[in-house]
Amino acid sequence: MGAERPLRFGLTPVFVDDDEALLAAFSRYLGEATGLPVEFVKRRSYQEITVLLLAGRLDVAWICGYPYVQFRDRLALVAVPLWQGSPLYRSYVVVGAESPARTFEDLRGTIHAFSDPDSNSGYLVTASLLRRRGEDPGRFFRHVFFTYGHRNVIRAVGRGLADGGSVDGYVFEVLRRIDPSLVDACRVLRRSELFGFPPVACRVEAEKDEVVVALRDALLAMPSHPTGRFVLELLGLDGFTVSGPELFDGIAANARLLARAA
């Protein structure tokens, strides 16, 4: 395969990417496996990465299930991570380690941190939970704000800037291992039902492009390659798999619920 241009891979805050060694190893592995130089593209918000992907300025992007279901007619699944043996994860509502809150209802009238308005675990799950109760975040909580990063939600709650926060359970558990001092300042108050894990996606018309096929093959082969296994270990993942859109039906149902309430 020629290397006239890099493989452009978009990353959102779903990716635990503060470790430059991790990014370097991931780039090295993908470059060796695909025969292409790899360019990671990071932006502050999910929306920015989704716009770049839809505009064809990225080959693939590791996005969230929420933007995937919002643009399911324009996006195709490339691969889905496997975490704890499954392509599924949960959303957590976390509070400070010393918080008196014992139930979700105890957070009424408090300050709540969300990750991103296009995040399933960092916004949609909590917003749809409230909608089913006839509430919305703006009325249930005294004040809400977006941190644009799951790590930032944990940091805001741990430092007392928010009474609670909605966060990706996978990110929380990975950070529990690699940055325990950050996570130890928080306590999990609520775990959601299971949802499809944030996928790697491309535009529908690019699904069979040589670059995308090579990237999918590289992701699926990671457990059988030393560098690939090293990257997976750093990410706290077991590997990647292929899946159909039905994996994200739960997210799609919540998205429709919220859209009807808008």
Image (cartoon, grey):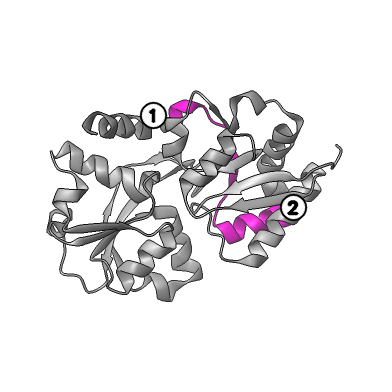
Q: Quadrant of the C terminus?
A: top left
Q: As rendered, which of 205 and 178 lies closer to the eye?
A: 205
Query: Is residue 241 part of the magenta span, yes or no?
Result: yes
Instruction: Measuring from the top left, give residue 36's x and y in whole percent.
Output: 80, 45
In the rendered image, residue 129 lying in the magenta stretch gets the answer no
Question: Residue drawn 59% across and 42% down?
Answer: 61
Percent position (x, y) of residue 110?
A: 17, 62
Q: Please provide the residue range marked out in magenta.
A: 225-247
Image mark count? 2
Query: What's the amino acid at mark 1?
Result: Asp
Residue pointed to by mark 1? 249
Residue visible at 71% across and 42% down in the picture: 218
Can residue 116 be seen in this snapshot? yes
**Mark 2: which amino acid?**
Tyr
Q: Is residue 186 left or right of residue 204?
A: left
Q: Which mark is residue 29?
A: 2
Q: Quadrant of residue 125?
A: top left
Numbered circle sitting on residue 111: none
Circle 1 — which element? helix
Characterize the local packing of mark 1: few (<14), some (14-19) or many (20 or more) Cα atoms within 10 angstroms: some
| Mark 2 neighbour density, 10 Å: few (under 14) some (14–19) many (20 or more) | many
Residue at 16 percent of width and 64 percent of height: 101
Disc 2 on helix, strand or loop? helix
Distance CA(mark 1)–CA(mark 2): 32 Å
Q: Is residue 197 left or right of residue 76?
A: left
Would residue 225 be visible to someone looking at this image? no
Q: Is tag 1's residue or tag 2's residue first in the polypeptide sequence?
A: 2
Say which of 230 and 208 sits in front. 208
Residue 160 location, x and y as percent? 27, 73
Q: Residue at x 52, y 40 (%)?
A: 50
**Quadrant of the image containing the N terminus:** top right
Residue 198 shown left or right of residue 7 in the figure = left
